[in-house]
Image (cartoon, rainbow, N blue to C red):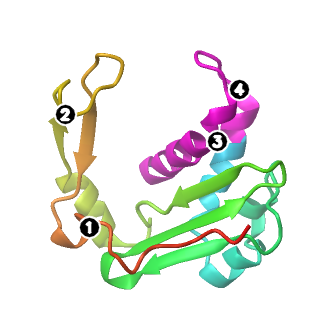
Amino acid sequence: MRSIVASAALAFAALASTVSAGSFSESDAKSMVYLAGAAYCDASALRSWSCGQACNGPLSVVPGTITVVQNSSMDLQAYVGQLSDGRAIVSFRGTQPSKLADWIDDLKSAFATTGKARLPCDGESLTVGYSPRPRRRRWPSTASARARW
């Protein structure tokens, strides 16, 4: 559940440019859950946007715009695509419920508070999580994607 919430947060952030500061749309939030869930689908089903309930949410994608990014050595999967309203979506898969190693990583996660000078965010400090496993510390150069629209 935590990973789906994290993926939904990333998906929501990608679409938040159309939402004014301080407003919240329950409809948009529900749409983000579908888009976040799609990151867990099989890559071939994801490319064709035919992965069941996750791909049948209220927001539709432009056919042929989905690019799936995978890196097996880092256990990474994400997708980039264009929604039918012209907005872009970027969603990362988080913890896979069936993988014990992912759950152990989640339990080992440590939290660090960034200083205001390191990462300004309206004058507040941010709390961020990280995984202690070296294979997840940096974005691999092979895991880049270019949207096709």
Residue 15 badge: 3
Q: Which residue is mark 4?
A: 25
- Alpha carbons under labels 3 and 2: distance apart: 25 Å
Query: For the residue marked with disc 3, what is the amino acid?
Result: Leu
Q: Residues within 10 Å of mark 4 (few under 14, many from 20)?
A: few
Residue at image coords 38%, 83%: 72
Q: Earlier in the sequence, mark 2 or mark 1?
A: 2
Query: Percent x, y for residue 101?
Result: 28, 71
Main secondary structure found in the magenta portion: helix
Residue at image coords 59%, 18%: 21
Q: Which residue is mark 2?
A: 118
The answer to the question of whether label 1 and label 4 lie on touching residues, with beta carbons closer than 8 A, is no
Query: Residue 49 magenta-drawn?
Result: no
In the picture, measured across the screen, residue 84 lies left or right of residue 128, that is: right
Q: Quadrant of residue 28?
A: top right
Residue 136 badge: 1
